[in-house]
Image: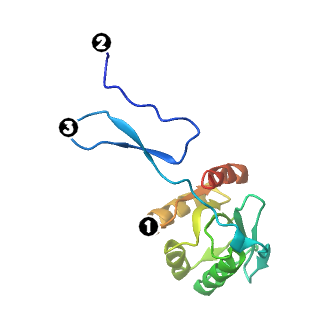
Amino acid sequence: MSAGPRRAAIPAGRPHLRARRRAGPRTGAIRARPQAPPVRVVASRMTPLRSITTRVAQIWIDDEDILHIDCAPGVQLTKSDIEAGRAAIEELSCHSKLPHFVDLRTVSTMDREARVLLAGPGTGLAAAILISSPLSRVIGNFILGFHKPRVPSRLFTEAPEALTWLRGFLA
């Protein structure tokens, strides 16, 4: 006699299989639904630019295809700065969506229009935002909760932890 409903095992190492529960009167039944593995088109990115510098930041892509945005010390981010940064990101990434590592530790202020624009449709898979202090975390969490970004976004105080989190979106 079994203690509960039997569950089908999903093979390890098969991220392209997604488990889902069957709707209806049966309980606990899980079956794997095949889904095509993600395909990355590399041919269109044969010779991408590797680094672009804007008025407020240096934007570059590392060997793991993580896009880094390093803001200059003491900058005040405006809507036009965000628009210029997005254009640079599109040019640098050849219109492919990459995870973003954003270093905001040296930014002095960001106006409301810039925050609203950042919360809109994103250019990336996810955003790890590097901040410098607990006060920045409180303010950042409030802003993220209020403006609801459309891509997964998280605040970090340590770069290695942020990069580890972003690598989860590259699989």
Label 3 crowding class (10 Å Cα cut-off): few <14, some 14-19, many 20+? few
Identify residue type, mark 2: Met
Q: In the image, which is nearer the foreground, mark 1 or mark 3?
A: 3
Checking the image for residue 1, the label placed there is 2
Q: Residue at 74% across / 58% down in the picture?
A: 64
Residue most toward the bottom? Answer: 80
Q: Residue at 61% across / 68% down in the picture?
A: 97
In depth, the one of 22 and 89 nearer the eye is 22
Q: Secondary structure at mark 3?
A: loop
* Quadrant of the snapshot with the N terminus: top left
Q: Earlier in the sequence, mark 2 or mark 3?
A: 2
- Give the percent coordinates (x, y) of residue 132: 68, 59
Res 136 visible: yes
Res 106 visible: no
Q: Earlier in the sequence, mark 1 or mark 3?
A: 3
Identify residue type, mark 3: Pro
Give the image quarter of residue 72: bottom right
Residue most toward the top? Answer: 1
Q: Secondary structure at mark 2?
A: loop
Identify residue type, mark 1: Phe
- Give the percent coordinates (x, y) of residue 165: 62, 51
Checking the image for residue 25, the label placed there is 3
In depth, the one of 76 and 47 nearer the eye is 47
In depth, the one of 135 and 130 nearer the eye is 130
Label 2 crowding class (10 Å Cα cut-off): few <14, some 14-19, many 20+? few
Q: Earlier in the sequence, mark 2 or mark 1?
A: 2
Q: Secondary structure at mark 1?
A: helix
- Give the percent coordinates (x, y) of residue 161: 67, 49
Checking the image for residue 146, the label placed there is 1
